[in-house]
Amino acid sequence: MPTDDLFLLQPTRLGPLSLSNRIVMAPMTRNRADRGGVPTGMMTTYYEQRASAGLIVSEAVQVSAQGQGYPFTPGLHTDAQVDAWRALTDAVHRSGGLIFAQLFHGGRIGHPAVTGEHPVAPSAIAADGEVHTYDGMKAFVEPRALATDEVGDVVEQFARAAANARRAGFDGVELHAANGYLIDQFLRDGTNRRTDRYGGSQAARRTFLLEVVEAVAEQVGPARVGVRLSPANPFNSMSDQDPRGTFEGAAAALAGRGLAYLHVVEDDGESGVDYGRMAAAFGGTYIANGSYDRDRGETALREGAAHLVAYGRPFLANPDLPLRFAENAPLNDADASTFYQGGAEGYVDYPTLEEVGAGI
């Protein structure tokens, strides 16, 4: 495919923001914060290296100590965290980039060995398997079901984190409503067995999501709020009897709110979810995510199936991914053994195209 007219490389608008291209760096947990959830200088280097993305979406950032899911992940609920993020966002901006903070609450995948307290969830249903903790792998524990009058407190955690994201210099926020974490746990009937106004019907199960969207939008403005969904992802032992209805309904409920975008982790179609219908139901900017390569992403943009395309592992291993797409150059392979181990290896040491050419 010719490189001089790639849609992927064309500038575009995202609400009040001007994007230099249509390539999004997808959020990826990397476990490089300190034990207090404070971003490190190495994290600043990592994101600044990737500032040529049209938009960076940060790794999942816990909205409270309660919401932490994994060791060495960053938060946005203390002044020290905000100050460290400010240094990071300043670096990204100096390099011409834009960055959203992905706001996250782990819900039932949290563990006392990480947070020091018992995890909470829509219902007292444990995830299958084990989770990483500071003390090694441990079995998931059965979470405590949130009382109805506690749910608003968790909504407020998201609102405070959004206000902190604004203080920290982020250009917007993405709500992590995917991959089996708290908002997703409310959305899907496999994890939500509530009988109050937050459970039962599909409409009731999306009440928590919509309350969080409204509270966060009040802090940063709706045009700076995106939402990420993963209708078919079974990660963290998630399930739903009608994923198509659940998530088309969620997309429709998010329509008309002036949000920045809907970011969807797509599958290969076996789930029966129609992503075109989801995009149409939302009616705004749609970010496609799901093992896209350069040509498939380009096709999605040209055919109108997406407005932006998010790349995870390709961006992890190729800090200059837009340039490599422009040159149709070979990509570095991602080293999965380094994804979550900490340290510089497999994090800030992937060579750029220029460095490869120079033999560095």
Image: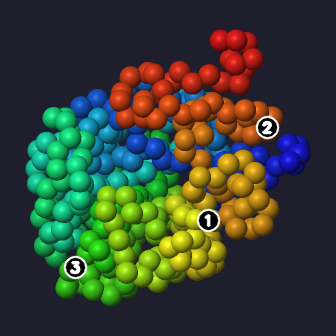
The amino acid type of the residue labelled 2 equals Asn
Tell me the CA gap for discs 3 and 2. 49 Å
In the rendered image, the vertical position of residue 186 relative to residue 132, given as above or below: below
| Residue 138 appears left or right of 85 | left
Dividing the picture into quarters, in which one does residue 141 lie? bottom left
Whichever of callouts 3 and 2 sits on the residue coming sooner in the sequence is: 3
Can you identify the residue that label 2 sits on? 328
Question: Whole-percent x and y of residue 2?
Answer: 89, 45
The amino acid type of the residue labelled 3 equals Arg
Nearest the camera: 94 or 107? 107
Tell me the CA gap for discs 1 and 2. 25 Å
Disc 1 is placed on an element classified as: strand
Nearest the camera: 139 or 77? 139
Disc 3 is placed on an element classified as: loop
Tell me the CA gap for discs 1 and 3. 30 Å
Count of marks placed on residues: 3
Label 2 packing within 10 angstroms: few (<14), some (14-19), many (20+)? some
Which label was assigned to residue 193?
3
Q: Residue at x 31, y 43 (%)?
A: 75
Disc 2 is placed on an element classified as: loop
Which label was assigned to residue 286?
1
